[in-house]
């Protein structure tokens, strides 16, 4: 199975939120999922503990990682499932190792021109560690719910990395669901999946197709 890294050396872009929701998506698909939690905040570790108390919820395995050696050992251990790596929003040896180990690296970027500097810094890091740029995919995150076209912004970024077709909106559903240890794909309003859940499913299915 595949190893997916959620990464960016800029904080506050939604890496952990995306990772947790993706872990739950795959778990609900019946796949075994493990998470290498390299983020000092250890939010993924906390959410897994919350979910473990509710036997009705499918959970994911998680290990708190603090060193490069720990990360290498964890990811290289035999596992028949999906491995997700959550990285910190800083440039350090652990983040770089996470990028190296990921067969697919998802980089969340907000649709704001202020993101250009952060992405250029990330591009320089990718170049310095000499990995295939084809495995880096840009996810436009925290976009306006009604926004549909981003071609002009993509041109402004002038990045060599490929953009994912799907985007994720900035909605409170993401925060609300995590507060109860759930994913937006488990949040329903009047028997209908919430707006954030619908959009996240589109994104998750795109990733699912990419790793087949």
Image: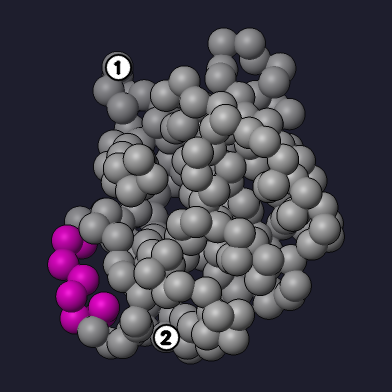
The answer to which quarter of the image holds residue 91 is: bottom right
Specify few, some or many for label 2: CA neighbours under 10 Å numbering under 14, 14-19, or 20 or more. Answer: some
Q: Nearer the viewer, mark 2 or mark 1?
A: 2
Instruction: Where is residue 189? Give x, y as percent.
Output: 33, 24
- Which comes before the other along the chain, label 2 or label 1? 2
**Residue 168 sits inside the magenta stretch:** no
Q: In terms of secondary structure, where does tag 2 sit?
A: helix
Q: Which mark is residue 116?
A: 2
Q: Give the extent of the magenta segment.
A: 147-154
Can residue 195 be seen in the rendering of this structure? no
Is the residue 195 above or below the residue 122 in the image?
Answer: above
- x 82%, y 52%: residue: 70
- Judge by depth and name the residue closer to the eye, 130 or 161: 130
- Lateral position of residue 190 relative to residue 211, left or right: left
- Judge by depth and name the residue closer to the eye, 63 or 141: 63
Can residue 9 be seen in the rendering of this structure? yes
**Residue 150 sits inside the magenta stretch:** yes
Residue for badge 1: 191
- Lateral position of residue 174 relative to residue 209, left or right: right
- x 17%, y 61%: residue: 148
The answer to which quarter of the image holds residue 8 is: bottom right
Is the residue 21 above or below the residue 158 in the image?
Answer: above
Instruction: Where is residue 197? Give x, y as percent.
Output: 35, 36
- Judge by depth and name the residue closer to the eye, 210 or 151: 210
Instruction: Where is residue 94? Give x, y as percent.
Output: 74, 66
Instruction: Where is residue 30? Give x, y as percent.
Output: 47, 20
Is the residue 169 above or below the residue 140 in the image?
Answer: above
Q: Which mark is residue 160?
A: none
- x 36%, y 24%: residue: 188
């Amino acid at each position: 199975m595949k190893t997916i890294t959620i990464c960016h050396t800029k904080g506050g872009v939604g890496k952990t939120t995306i990772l947790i929701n993706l872990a739950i998506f795959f778990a609900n698909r019946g796949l075994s999922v493990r998470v290498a939690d390299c983020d000092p905040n250890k939010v993924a570790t906390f959410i897994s503990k919350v979910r473990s108390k509710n036997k009705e919820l499918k959970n994911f395995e998680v290990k708190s990682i603090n060193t490069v050696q720990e990360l290498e050992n964890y990811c290289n251990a035999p596992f028949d499932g999906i491995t997700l790596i959550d990285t910190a929003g800083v440039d350090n040896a652990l983040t770089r190792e996470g990028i190296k180990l990921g067969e697919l690296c998802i980089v969340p970027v907000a649709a704001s021109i202020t993101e250009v500097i952060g992405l250029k810094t990330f591009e320089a890091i990718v170049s310095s560690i000499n990995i295939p740029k084809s495995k880096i995919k840009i996810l436009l995150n925290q976009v306006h719910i009604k926004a549909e076209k981003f071609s002009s912004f993509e041109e402004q970024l002038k990045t060599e990395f490929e953009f994912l077709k799907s985007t994720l909106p900035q909605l409170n559903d993401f925060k609300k669901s995590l507060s109860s240890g759930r994913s937006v794909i488990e949040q329903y309003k009047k028997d209908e999946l919430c707006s954030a859940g619908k959009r996240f499913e589109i994104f998750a299915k795109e990733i699912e197709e990419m790793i087949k």
